[in-house]
Amino acid sequence: MRKVYGRPRFLKKRSFHYCAGCGHSIVHRLLAEVIEEMGIHERVVGVNSAGCSVFAYNYLDVDMAEAAHGRGAAVATGMKRAYPEAVVFTYQGDGDLAAIGTAETIHAANRGEKISAIFINNAIYGMTGGQMAPTTLVSMRTTTTPFGRDVMLEGHPLKISEMLALLDGVVYIERTAVNSPAGIRKTKKAIRKSFQTQLDGKGFSLVEILSPCPVNWKMGVAESWQWIDKEMTGVFPLGIIKDTTGNKDAD
Amino acid sequence: MDGNSAVGEAAIRAGCQCYFGYPITPQNELTEYMATHLSRRKGCSFIQAESEISAINMVFGASAVGARSMTSSSSPGMSLKQEGISYLASCELPAVIVNMSRGGPGLGTISAAQSDYFQSTRGGGHGDYRTIVLAPSSVQELADLTHRAFDLADKYRIPVIILGDGMLGQMQEPVDFRHEAPAELPVRSDALRGARGRPSKIVRTCTSNTSEMEELNWSLYRRYQLIEKKETAFETFLVDDAELIVVAFGIAARIAKGAIKSARANGLKVGLARPITLWPFPSGRIKELAATAKCLLVFEMNMGQMLEDVQLALQGQGEVFFYGRPGGVIPTPSEVLRVISRHYYQRGLKKGK
Ligand SMILES: Cc1ncc(C[n+]2csc(CCOP(=O)(O)OP(=O)(O)O)c2C)c(N)n1
Ligand code: SF4
Ligand SMILES: [Mg+2]
């Protein structure tokens, strides 16, 4: 019998603690697959962050360090500068990357740090129990916007990828979603391209991944996956936001 | 050479590979020195970070991959670094952090002060941890202790703080650098450099397991005990026959020394005890001295912070006076001499040769 599917080599033999239907586990798997396929595991140093993925190092079988909440881009900067041979990625949620870590993110991007940011946008603070994130949609109910996000009070969803795309140090940003097989394949390709961009020494790259959080969205899994298409992609359109790498396709 | 630049040169000669900093007076000369002298060195990196928070987290990253790394700041910036220092302590990562402290609280003044003693010696950030705190009192000692700081940080995998002040940082004195920069340093065995020929490694601080966290605290505590035993440093000056001993650190000790020389010329038997490590605090030596002298006069450029460590060391045994000048005021030796003389005569201490 031919084996067509199995555990990627760089995913530890341990079951995920993530909720059923959560996007984090899918993205972990994609990372492990890309690292294996690119043959870069001996050079990879990852930075995980406070958020539901704070224990990402329990799953990804590569060197990893846990950054303080929001400081991933600064930690990754220190790593890459001190050890340029490393392939450095950060794994950050929307609260981490686009609220508390906004300054670190923008300045690392602006310096054109040769790092890859894997940015999980689930429009919510998952780990702390479903509070508003900077990416929470207008009218969306969270535990801290119990009446729905009101733009007069809480402002609009923050489009950090579009903001970052304005910076000259940024060479590649793509927004994908992991709510369908096609989206998952695209996400994998984008992660791969981001790593390739780093290997080529071109500059800062980021993959924003729209990712379901059925638990805090208070939806079933199927519904949460549909909600990404129905609601999220309207505010956060999928596709390449910036690409000056000159690489049409990493594959 | 000015004190700030001396720290920079000593750091480079200690093999510092990464410096990340954010401008703040009175330590800008150090950041600028590193921009000029470190940034283009082979295998080295300099970044003017977007904030002190970023700078300390860059140090965290560089240290995690095994580089000797440093950041520096002055008091308001040190407050911002505390989160990062707590994480460094938790992850047992070495780092050297320089504080050319200034008068506070708040934005305060840019003039020299010692009001960050509590912050430096009590960990400073959240959680149960310590940092080694070195308090030089001359430019030469700044350079020497900078070198030592890197060794201590690596030896104990701990953040080390050099607690200077605006005056030390700015003043010009001759310095003798005793080391040449190493051609190459060995890579720390715990460095994250990719899982090449070994299993993957992690640097982590979060756990959902309280007994694991308790064990980390115990293991840190045991290390702190070892540091207390091995690394306490102290200087004395004319204490053998002293009736009154001034206890002061850093630049205040320098000022006190001047006052003590004049006091001696007037026949007052006064000496100086100067803790060089503020943590670990030389409690044992302070206790010994308190037993030989009639009284101690703690002199600090703050409202009495090291004073508490002196009192803790004495456990109520012995008489302690305090003279403090907070806010960035730098008292002159003659002001300190007046305080020494007043206590000396009021206490009815014997004069002599
Ligand atoms: C300094 C600090 N403040 C607050 C927290 C609490 N905290 C942990 S994760 C988190 C937000 C997580 O949201 P996000 O980054 O979107 O990740 P998710 O859990 O949604 O994947 C917060 C506020 C913290 N760990 N540190
Ligand atoms: S709370 Fe949301 S983001 Fe966190 S594990 Fe559960 S589904 Fe995933
Ligand atoms: Mg989130």
Image (cartoon, coloured by chain):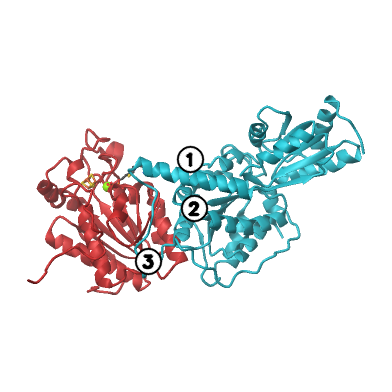
Q: Give the CA separation, mark 1 to mark 2.
A: 19 Å
Q: Which mark is residue A153?
A: none
Q: Nearer the viewer, residue A220 or A161?
A: A220
Q: Residue A202 in the image: x percent, y percent?
A: 36, 71
Which circle's residue, 3 or 2, is located before the other in the chain? 2
The local crowd at label 3, few if under 14, some if 14 to 19, many if 20 or more residues have their Cα within 10 Å, is many
Q: As shown in the figure, which amino acid type bears the numbered disc 3?
A: Gly
Instruction: Tell me the kind of residue under disc 1.
Output: Asp
Please tell me which residue is depicted at 74% across the width and 43% down the height of the picture: B253
The residue at which mark 3 appears reads as B194
Q: Is residue B261 visible?
A: yes
Q: Earlier in the sequence, mark 3 or mark 1?
A: 1
> Disc 1 marks which residue?
B128
Residue drawn at 71 percent across, 49 percent down: B137
The amino acid pointed to by label 2 is Ile
- Which one is nearer the viewer's eye here, A72 or A177? A72
Residue A16 lies, in percent from the top left, at 22, 51
Which residue carries the number 2 mark? B56
